[in-house]
Image (cartoon, rainbow, N blue to C red):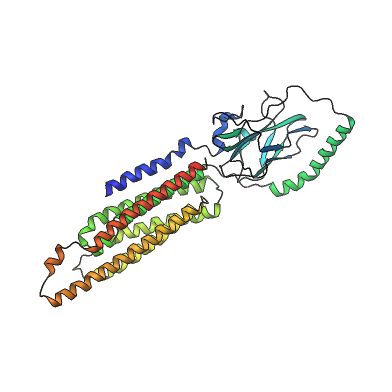
């Protein structure tokens, strides 16, 4: 059984680790594409793009005045990824500097001269500020990604300069410039201190920590302390599991603490709670390990106290760990994962309740038969206890729940790439 669990862990945890080398949901990994704004997703779409950049061009008269740039989707269309820059000509370098209005949906790369997405959550609009460093005519161009196989390259910048502007046009441009200068202070008031953009490492660290927490739960259930209570001969398996479980949780806590210290994530309030409960889960697991190694056999005078203690520690460990996993899953904003985790928690509660019921039933049947016959202890010991079949069934379903959750977290993250 433990070999099977180890195989499942290596399979699914290794699968989730693929994100470190294959996931490009975050644009911060596209720094090498800043010059050409190229996306290697195969052939681009030949249909008209449902996405647009506003404005497409601007004649800058006064430099250092910020301009609001909008990436917009038509009708029901939504884009997952984008790369935006501003240039004077097709072969020119990116000009000006961007600053963020909505850090949850945009991130700066290439020294702040290019804007891209931090994740692949569907978006209808994204707004950023662009500040020119010199005057002249500039063109705003963007690449849009609707899905991995559906994307649109940026529009080419015309090679020939536009016709000289008339006085009326100049007047309009100046008016627009004045309008921009009037609205700019309002924009800066709301975005003068934007919070840091959520880096992609948040998703990676959270996914790996969740995989470790889920596998630690599998170790805990596979070598449940109830085995030591109901069948004392099973204490070796429980002791091994009680050491393995906190080891995985400690690694998960290290991942989460590194992420919490180094990065600011989208669901920051949930991340703080997730970190706190993960650390608390480590503490509860260590208490569980200590309690397991203080094992008191059936004839020990402190056995009742030990049984009460280990049941209390088990319940605390279960609640804290399940809450930590719930909070981690919540960050993925996928309701079906929450429902699946809820089903897992209910199934685990049924396991505890059923184990106690089976134990009480065995005691009752033993007493009843001993009253009818003199001594039938030997026969009872040779029979296979019905709770053992129940334990095997629950263990199989625990493996299935854990595998489904680990695969779900990995697949959702890959879909968000």
User: Residue shown at 56%/33% (left/top)?
Assistant: 30
Question: Seen in the image, is 92 located left or right of residue 200?
Answer: right
Q: Residue 224's x, y, as percent?
A: 30, 58
Q: Residue 20's x, y, as percent?
A: 46, 38
Q: Which of 34 and 409 is in front in this view?
A: 409
User: Residue shown at 71%/25% (left/top)?
Assistant: 89
Q: Is residue 9 above or below residue 369?
A: above
Q: Residue furthest front?
A: 47
Q: Residue furthest bottom?
A: 371
Q: In this view, does 61 lie above or below 202?
A: above
Q: Residue furthest right?
A: 167
Q: Residue 266's x, y, as percent?
A: 56, 49
Question: Seen in the image, is 127 located left or right of residue 297?
Answer: right
* Corner quadrant of residue 94: top right
* Corner quadrant of residue 292: bottom left
User: Residue shown at 12%/66% (left/top)?
Assistant: 379
Q: Can residue 277 be seen in this view?
A: no
Question: Seen in the image, is 155 located left or right of residue 212?
Answer: right
Q: Residue 305's x, y, as percent?
A: 28, 70
Q: Is residue 303 visible?
A: yes
Question: Seen in the image, is 329 located left or right of residue 380?
Answer: right
């Amino acid at each position: 059984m433990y070999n099977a669990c180890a195989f499942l862990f290596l399979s699914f945890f290794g699968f989730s680790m693929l994100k470190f080398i294959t996931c490009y949901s975050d644009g911060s990994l596209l720094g090498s594409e800043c010059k050409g704004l190229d996306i290697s997703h195969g052939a681009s779409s030949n249909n008209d793009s449902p996405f647009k950049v506003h404005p497409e061009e601007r004649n800058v008269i006064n430099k250092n005045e910020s301009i609001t740039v909008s990436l917009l989707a038509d009708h029901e269309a939504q884009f997952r990824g984008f790369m935006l820059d501003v240039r004077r000509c097709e072969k020119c370098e990116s000009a000006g500097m961007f600053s963020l209005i909505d850090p949850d949906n945009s991130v700066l790369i290439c020294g702040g001269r290019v804007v891209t997405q931090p994740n692949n959550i569907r978006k209808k609009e994204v707004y950023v500020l662009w500040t020119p460093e010199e005057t002249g005519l500039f063109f705003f161009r963007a690449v849009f990604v609707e899905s991995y196989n559906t994307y649109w390259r940026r529009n080419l910048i015309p090679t020939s300069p536009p016709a000289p502007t008339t006085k009326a046009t100049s007047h309009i441009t100046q008016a627009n410039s004045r309008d921009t200068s009037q609205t700019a202070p309002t924009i800066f008031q709301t975005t003068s201190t934007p919070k840091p953009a959520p880096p992609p490492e948040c998703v990676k660290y959270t996914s790996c920590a969740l995989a470790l927490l889920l596998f630690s739960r599998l170790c805990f259930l596979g070598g449940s302390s109830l085995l030591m209570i109901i069948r004392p001969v099973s204490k070796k398996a429980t002791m091994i599991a009680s050491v393995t479980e906190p080891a995985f949780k400690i690694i998960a806590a290290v991942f989460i603490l590194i992420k919490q210290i180094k990065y600011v994530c989208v669901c920051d309030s949930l991340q703080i709670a997730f970190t706190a409960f993960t650390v608390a889960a480590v503490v509860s697991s260590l208490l569980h390990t200590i309690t397991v190694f203080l094992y008191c056999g059936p004839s020990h005078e402190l056995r009742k106290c030990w049984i009460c203690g280990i049941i209390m520690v088990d319940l605390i460990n279960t609640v804290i760990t399940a809450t930590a996993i719930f909070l981690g899953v919540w960050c993925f904003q996928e309701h079906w994962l929450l429902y699946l985790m809820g089903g897992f928690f209910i199934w685990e509660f049924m396991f505890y309740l059923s184990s106690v019921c089976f134990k009480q039933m065995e005691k009752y049947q033993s007493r009843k038969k001993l009253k009818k016959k003199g001594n039938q202890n030997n026969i009872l010991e040779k029979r296979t206890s019905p709770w053992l079949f129940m334990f095997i069934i629950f263990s199989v379903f625990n493996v299935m729940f854990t595998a489904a959750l680990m695969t779900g977290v990995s697949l959702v993250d890959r879909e968000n790439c």
